[in-house]
Structures are given as C-alpha cells and as structure tokens.
C-alpha cells in the first residue's frame, strides 16, 4: 500500500512540475512529453528492479545512464534549465519507486525538488541578467573597445564578453555576451547583423 501511495505522489509531483512550472514558463510542448516519459519510465524500471533480486544501485545507474545518453545524443539544443527539469523528473521517478520505511520522507523530498525548481527557475530571480550570442558587423580586436561597443548597443552593463570567432576577412565578430539591463526590460540588439538565437537569462 505505501508503494501505491508513492506512485500517486510521484504522478502528482511530475504533473505539477511539467504543467504547473515548466510549460507555463517556457512553452515547449515537445519537452512536456519527454519529461513525462522519463519520469514514468524511470518509475516503472526502478520499481521492477526493486521488486527483484537486482540491486537498487544497478537500477539507479541504468536510469542515470539512460537520461545522460538522451541529453548527450539530443538532436535539438537544450538550455541548462531544461536539463535541470530532466533530472528533476528523473529524481521524482526514483523517489517514487524506492521502498522506504517512511512515505513522508519520500514525499517530503519530492516536495523539496518542486520547491527548489519553483524558486530557482522563477522569472523574478536575477531577472535583469541576460545572455546572448551576437554577430557584430565589424572585427573588434580590443577587449575594452568591444565591451564599450556592446554596452552602447545593448544599453546595458556587460559583465563578460567572450569572442568566439574573429573574422578579419569578412569583418565580423562572434561574441558571447553576459550582461544586465539597467531597467525593467531588456533593450533590443541593434548590431549591424541580427543576433543569433540566445535566450535572455
């Protein structure tokens, strides 16, 4: 009976994680299926292994290997917060499958995961900080000049500017920029060529 209660708690937790936290904030439908599948799959495999003579450590290792393989061999780009949701869904499934003496302990750990994800991925947390990969229509070799130029374009304070590619022939600079806006919203990028897709942080 306690195992069935844990199953129910896990299902409720992953539904809250996916439909209460992730999708309303990031609106990526394909990952909704991925998170639900990872959670239920790990829950099923770990439950079957815990009921057999196979050690729980082997089951946990197989689950981690599977998720890491999915993340490593993915064909589409995942942001770091999406990887965090992957591991949260994995952890919820493992907690729901482990046979413990206290249902409250497993339920409390699941709640802790949800609280951490709610706070860590909250839109108001460090909301002024941004990250973009920008292509400039000029080859800038001096770091001070580059930072000043980016601050003028972005209307923000640049914390780090890492040049990823400097093309002296075509007069372009590909730069990874970490910056913070000075107001409530971010200023649009006004470089000579459009910035590549870099989600604001």
Image (spheres, helix red, strand yellow):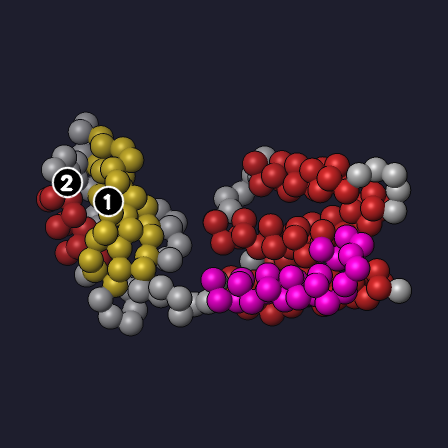
Q: Secondary structure at mark 1?
A: strand
Disc 1 + disc 2, Cβ < 8 Å: yes
Could you tell me which residue is drawn at 66 percent across and 66 percent down? 108
Residue, disc 1: 161
Specify which label sits upstream in the sequence, 1 or 2.
2
Q: Is residue 76 magenta?
A: no
The numbered disc on residue 143 is 2
Q: Nearer the viewer, residue 52 or 162?
A: 52
Report the quarter where the N terminus lies: bottom right
Toward which corner of the image does residue 32 lie, by quadrant? bottom right
Residue 66 seen anywhere in this rendered image of the structure: no
Spot occupied by residue 176 in the image (x, y as percentages of width and height): 30, 44
What is the distance, in whole Å, between disc 1 and disc 2 at their CAs?
8 Å
Name the residue located 65 percent from the left edge and 41 percent from the top edge: 64
Q: Residue furthest top?
A: 169
Disc 2 crowd, CA 10 A, few/some/many (<14, 14-19, 20+): few
Magenta-span inclusion, residue 99: yes
Indicate the secondary structure of the residue bearing disc 2. Answer: helix
117 to the left or right of 52: left
Question: Going 54% across and 52% down the picture, which residue do you hit?
Answer: 84
> Which disc, if any, is residue 11?
none
């Amino acid at each position: 009976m306690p195992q069935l209660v844990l199953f129910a708690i896990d299902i409720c937790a992953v539904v809250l994680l996916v439909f209460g936290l992730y999708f309303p904030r990031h609106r990526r439908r394909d990952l909704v299926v991925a998170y639900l599948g990872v959670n239920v799959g790990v829950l099923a495999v770990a439950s079957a292994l815990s009921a057999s003579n196979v050690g729980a450590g082997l089951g946990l290792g197989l689950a981690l290997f599977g998720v890491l393989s999915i993340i490593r061999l993915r064909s589409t780009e995942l942001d770091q917060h999406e990887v965090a949701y992957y591991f949260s869904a994995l952890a919820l499934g493992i907690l729901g499958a482990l046979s413990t003496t206290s249902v409250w302990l497993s339920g409390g750990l699941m709640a802790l995961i949800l609280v951490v994800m709610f706070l860590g991925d909250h839109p108001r947390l460090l909301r002024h900080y941004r990250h973009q990969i920008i292509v400039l229509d000029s080859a800038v070799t001096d770091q001070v000049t580059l930072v000043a130029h980016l601050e003028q374009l972005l209307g923000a304070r640049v914390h780090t500017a890492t040049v990823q590619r400097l093309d002296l022939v075509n007069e372009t600079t590909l730069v990874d920029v970490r910056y913070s806006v000075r107001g409530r919203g971010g200023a649009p990028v006004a470089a000579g060529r459009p910035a590549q897709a870099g989600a604001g942080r």
